[in-house]
Image (cartoon, helix red, strand yellow):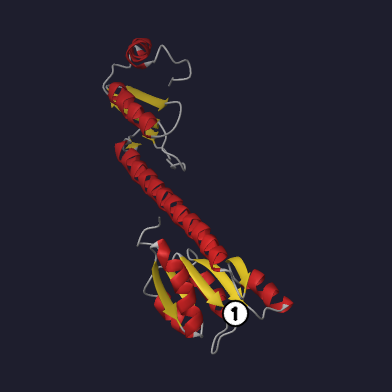
Amino acid sequence: MSTAQEKILIVDDEPNVRKSIARVLRSEGWQIMEAVDGTAALELMQQIDFNLVISDLRMPRMNGVEFLAIASKTHPNSAQIMLSGHARPADLENIINQCKVIQFMEKPWMPAELQEKARQIVAANVDQRRQQHASQMMVGEVNMAAKLQLASLPKPIRAENLQVDWIFRACTTLGGDGLGYRIVEDRLDFYMVDVVGHGVAAALESFSLQQILATSDMRQPELVAQKMNRDHVNKGDGMHYF
């Protein structure tokens, strides 16, 4: 059963048609709203985010193709169904070229068929929105991780006989790359580390390794490497390394 969060807009200039469609779809538990034409529908869509818009083709002031073409640009996340009993080849061509209609149905439509098509399209629309939200969350997390990585990197060195600088660009997935350096007496200690794989686990392990490297005595780097191998390498997994 669908949830009340899913919203359907029915656009038709004939009240009886709107009521018939609403009656067929209301059993799904969706929020159903109606508009008499494309102009009124666009005004509603400015206020409400609809999962599905079901529109007639022939309407006054603004026909279905004109309306759905605008809606495709202003509300691309809303799925579209076109209903018509008077479609010509030119109409179908315009629908394909200008709109994002997922389903075209001829009048008189069968209630069971309309209900099933709407159910499938709404379910796909909900799933698509979830994926978009997850993708946006992932991008946000990557951007935040990139800022944290930037904040942990050392400041450039501008000494009389030494200049040290770096450039950092975040990739599209969270990774385990890092670098660091410091001047100790008359020596420059520096390191670069890359943990295999991507994601939170790789990033956290990289931060942990960098804490060791940042405080280690680099005059004997082989001892530092031995300690890292002893404490961090997963002996049971040959594909887990840095």
Q: Position of residue 241 (x, y in %)?
A: 44, 19
- Does 193 sit above or below residue 109? above
Quadrant of the rendered image containing residue 58: bottom right
Q: Position of residue 131 (x, y in %)?
A: 45, 50
- Name the residue: 37% across, 42% down: 146
- Does 174 sit above or below residue 128? above
Which residue occupies the foreground of this view, 221 or 194?
194
Q: Amino acid at mark 1?
A: Leu
Residue 240 visible in rendering: yes
Which residue occupies the foreground of this view, 184 or 52?
52
Does 118 sit left or right of 146 as displayed?
Answer: right
Does 70 sit left or right of 167 as displayed?
Answer: right
Q: Position of residue 184 (x, y in %)?
A: 28, 23
- Name the residue: 48% across, 63% down: 77
- Does 187 sit above or below residue 150? above
Quadrant of the rendered image containing residue 141: top left
- Name the residue: 36% across, 74% down: 47
Within 10 Å of the Cα at label 1, are there few (<14), some (14-19), or many (20+) other Cα atoms?
many
Residue occupying the far right of the picture: 89
Tell me the quadrant of the picture where the N terminus can be found: bottom left
Tell me the quadrant of the picture where the C terminus can be found: top left
The residue identified by callout 1 is 57
Which residue occupies the foreground of this view, 206 or 199?
199
- Secondary structure category for the residue under label 1: loop
Residue occupying the far bottom of the picture: 61
Q: Position of residue 128 (x, y in %)?
A: 48, 54
- Number of numbered labels in the structure image: 1
Residue 7 visible in rendering: no
